[in-house]
Amino acid sequence: MATVINMPRLSDTMEEGVVAKWLVKKGDKISEGDILAEIETDKATMEFESFYDGTLLHIGIEEGETAPVDKLLAIIGEEGEDISDLVNGKASTEEKESSKSDKEGEKAEAQEEPSTSESKEIPEGVEVITMPRLSDTMEEGTVATWLKKVGDTVEEGDILAEIETDKATMEFESFYNGTLLHIGIEEGKTAPVDALLAIIGPEGTDVSGIKEGSISSSPSAKEEDTVKEKETKSDTKSSSSSTNTAPEGGRIFASPLAKKIAADKGIDLAQVKGSGENGRIVKKDIESFTPSTSSEQTQTSSPANHEAPAGNLQAFVPAGEVSFEEVKNSQMRKAIAKSLSASKFTAPHYYLTIEVDMQNAMVSRRHINELPDTKVSFNDMVVKACAMALCKHPQVNTQWTDEATQYAKHISIGVAVAVPDGLVVPVLPFTDQMSLTQIGAKVKDLAGRARNKKLTPQEMSGSTFTVSNLGMFGIQEFTSIINQPNSAILSVGAIVEKPVVKDSQIVVGNTMKITLACDHRTVDGATGAQFLQTLQQYLENPVTMLA
């Protein structure tokens, strides 16, 4: 008999877990003691072993997905065993209605009706797909693009849609084979996690009962579905004829992520050979693509390659006419607004600014970058100096809770990176243990993947301090909002050439203003000032960071 395995509670404070990696796959033979998966808790990533023998019949939580404790994780049983009731029937309406009828003392005939209606509502072979939880903080998602339309044949592994979360736009693939019978959330629409996303099943199956029971549809829902189907078909035809056609007239198959990276790099997809299934272009094909000489000349000589697409050009507005354009807030923008508003209105901010002499830092950086295969930026030097200063001032490396102040024994610095949709903060774990060159390489890697929306949620969480640098934009001085639960954030301005006084003489110097925003609940003014003094000493004498 099949056994249901739920998300375990692997720590005393664990409320939900992330499946970091599955070590077995569906259909594998499992023995008691085998490691099934690596599960990330709020404290550590731990191995989870099986206590049963059998075959892995079902995986309920895919790699990278977050789920609460006790949610269906996997099912182990005998090979070929029917587990449809366990997969589709956990906390099913049928069970609830059956138990309710038992309590009310209804007759057996009355009990059969809900069962009959349920079997009619969920026909055999039909799979209901809900809005997935694609990040640890995701509460709702927006369907950015549907890559399938109603009536299309879907195979396991096919990309169904691009779903925009609060952190990134991610591809969502199907785990089932069949026909796409219904789309529950149209492109551009936002819905909470677990809302009906789509229904897949045998072609021609009547799923009206599932639609009506899962979403609040108007009486004309079927008519709307028909209209939407026609619109989707016409949109698909127009898009395939305009954007998905190769020079020979054939359709170009590429993943949404590959298309995004190609657009950012100005790469013509028609020139890329796909390595995916059926010649589908995937991200590694774009990353490894080397343009031909002719294409390079075309990209160099034609300024159109660097301009925004025609669809992004602002419409003409006659002079003197008042006009507005409404742009829907992305999930990332909503998350930024929510978190920064909470920080600004709950944490009592105050700001401390000093001016740092960067003359020695400029000389040191030049000498470091003369070494083979070495590239260090001023921002890398600031991050390293912050990590070393935090070691000496642990009060700044804290987090406020209503019950206590938590002192982080580790130092993990987040570096704010601007992306088209807003701002993300990739994190350098254990920054104090990294060298300048390691910091430089890691920041470059994280920043590049952040702009291509390839960061994982884990790479954007766990910071104990944050650095925000606008110096490259010529900003000389600014203040930032604390990235909670951190207690402080450093704002870094541009290096400015200006007259300075040295040894009672006015000479040409290079200075940089840095501003520390502190949470007064955890960091007092004197503590913040002492931290900046130490930071200044490291930056003005970079050789001390190499000791």
Image (cartoon, rainbow, N blue to C red):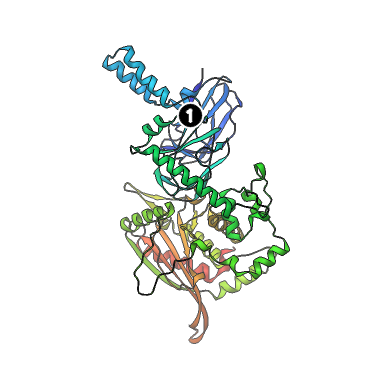
Quick check: can you spot residue 123?
A: yes
- Who is closer to the viewer here, 20 or 96? 96
- Who is closer to the viewer here, 547 or 70? 70
- Who is closer to the viewer here, 41 or 320? 320
Identify whether 115 is placed above or below 287: above
Identify whether 87 is placed above or below 544: above
Q: Position of residue 295 (x, y in %)?
A: 69, 63
Q: Position of residue 165 (x, y in %)?
A: 45, 48
State which quarter of the image contains the C terminus. bottom right
Q: What residue type is labelled 1?
A: Thr
Q: Disc 1 on helix, strand or loop?
A: loop
Identify whether 458 is placed above or below 384: above
Q: How many marks?
A: 1
**Image check: 190 left or right of 127?**
left
Residue occupying the point 55% across, 19% down: 81
Q: Position of residue 363 (x, y in %)?
A: 60, 74
**Residue farthest along the left direction in this orientation:** 104
Residue occupying the point 50% across, 35% down: 61
Q: Quadrant of residue 192?
A: top left
**Residue farthest along the right direction in this orientation:** 293
**Residue farthest along the top direction in this orientation:** 108
Quick check: can you spot residue 454?
A: no
What residue did someone put label 1 on?
205
Identify whether 47 is placed above or below 297: above
- Who is closer to the viewer here, 412 or 166? 166
**Image check: 227 left or right of 101?**
right
Q: Quadrant of residue 315?
A: bottom left
Is the residue marked by circle 1 packed among few (<14), some (14-19), or many (20+) residues within 10 Å? some
Q: Position of residue 90 (x, y in %)?
A: 42, 26
